[in-house]
Amino acid sequence: MKLEGIHHVTAITGDAPRNLDFYSRVLGLRLVKKTVNQDDPTVYHLFYADEGGSPGADLTFFEYPGAARGRPGAGMVHRVVWRVGSADALDFWTDRLAGEGMATERAGGALRLRDPEGLEHELVVTDRDDAPLIADHPEVPAEMALQGFDAVRAYSADPAASRRLLEEGLGFTGAGDGAWEARGEQRGGVIAYDEPPADPGRPGAGTVHHVAWASTMDDHPAWRARARAGGARPTEVIDRFWFRSIYFAEPSGVLFEIASMGPGFATDEDPEHLGEKLVLPPRYEPMRNRIEATLAPLADPRGRAHEG
Ligand code: ZN
């Protein structure tokens, strides 16, 4: 039983319209689900991914309108690492982001950038055989597109404390230098730990809330016992409609989720029209009028681009 790399990464935004503009129009991801936080239906939960809404390429945001900027500290993911196909893609993204007035930074063979609220991303040229998970975008050629997650980097003063849970509980293998990889039959993904800054972290806009690791549907019920055997204290299985989830903090403090790779985002929407309408969890459907009145309308710029 192996985890199939990263399932999704969930972060916080204080400004859903600007967040949508950046991730859909600029970075070229597809908005695959527009819904509300299942624990607080007055705020958006936006899901971006590849064209198919696949685990492995799914970046999601809780919106807390007007939320203050956070900053990552010990026990928090501070960087999301994506794969691209070639060094040409790094040049493409350098130019495209410069065209938006956004600074980027070359670091070794990678390109670092920040979203409008400071969340850090890194693009790395992949040498993996994993299927590229890309979205269609009129201004982003397929060979330049983001191909899904490679890794998350988190801050930890003592990464060795996480070893037992990662290796014995969750089946990760050491990838050297404070990094561990979860690799299944289809995909792999890495968590790497860096020395934390002196200042403590502060959750808020532009920070990562949790990272989810992907499990096959069949294996998912068994991961709870495996996490417990590794010393974690997982929640019960929670039905998130598009996947099932358990949550627990790993010893360095990073909030982990293990999410099933189905039933997927097309379970309640036409795959051709994912993310176009506000989808509500069934128990909130009777309150739709009130919920829609509290949410600022969101127009997907990619939707308009495709119409034109
Ligand atoms: Zn999640």
Image (cartoon, grey):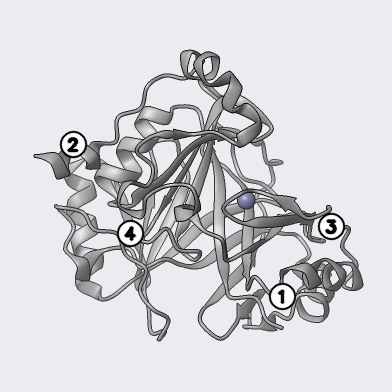
Task: Please say if 21 is above or below 121.
Answer: above
Residue denoted by label 4: 51
In this orientation, does residue 101 appear? no
Task: Please report whichever mark, 3 or 1, sits nearer to the chain's N-terminal start.
Answer: 1
Q: Residue at x 25, y 65 (%)?
A: 90
Task: Please say if 165 is above or below 52.
Answer: below
Q: Amino acid at mark 4?
A: Glu
Residue denoted by label 2: 304
Q: Quadrant of the C terminus?
A: top left
CA separation in Å, label 3 and label 4: 31 Å
Residue denoted by label 1: 219
Residue 50, position as x, y percentages in the image: 36, 59
In this orientation, does residue 51 appear? yes
Which structural element holds mark 2? helix
Q: Residue at x 83, y 52 (%)?
A: 235
CA separation in Å, label 3 and label 1: 16 Å
Task: Please report whichever mark, 1 or 2, sits nearer to the chain's N-terminal start.
Answer: 1
Residue denoted by label 3: 234
